[in-house]
């Protein structure tokens, strides 16, 4: 799947939940993680739960 493809998720209009970094990766914000309500333990860049790999 290319970085220009929407893939299985439609993030349109939810810019407070993510951004695209300089490498074209979709990066979830702390706002998104807090809204989800739990830590996925993947070492996310903006983890509000303090998990580090």
Image: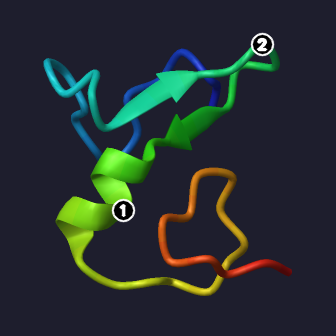
Q: Kindly identify the residue that appears in the image at 19 percent across and 28 percent down.
A: 14
Q: Quadrant of the C terminus?
A: bottom right
Asked if the residues shown at circle 2 and circle 1 are in contact, with their CB atoms under 8 angstroms apart, the answer is: no
Residue 17: x, y in percent? 31, 38
Residue 24: x, y in percent? 70, 19
Q: Kindly identify the residue that appears in the image at 50 percent across and 77 percent down.
A: 49
* Residue 10 image label: none
Which quadrant holds residue 42?
A: bottom right
Q: Nearer the viewer, mark 2 or mark 1?
A: 1
Q: Nearer the viewer, residue 4 or 42?
A: 42
Number of disc labels: 2
Residue of label 2: 22
Say which element carries label 1.
helix
Tell me: 3 left or right of 4.
right
Task: Classify mark 1: residues with Cα within 10 Å, few (<14), some (14-19) or many (20+).
Answer: some
Q: Nearer the viewer, residue 42 or 24?
A: 42
Q: Kindly identify the residue that appears in the image at 28 percent across and 21 percent down.
A: 15
Earlier residue among tags 2 and 1:
2
Residue of label 1: 33
Say which element carries label 2.
loop
**Where 28 sits versus 13, above or below?**
below
Cα separation between marks 2 and 1:
21 Å
Tell me: 45 left or right of 4.
right
Which quadrant holds residue 38?
A: bottom left
Tell me: 12 left or right of 3.
left
């Amino acid at each position: 799947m290319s970085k220009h493809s929407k893939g299985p998720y439609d993030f349109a209009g939810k810019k407070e939940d993510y951004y695209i970094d300089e490498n074209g990766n979709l990066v979830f914000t702390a706002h998104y993680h807090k809204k989800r309500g739990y830590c996925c333990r993947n070492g996310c860049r903006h983890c509000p739960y303090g998990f580090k790999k």
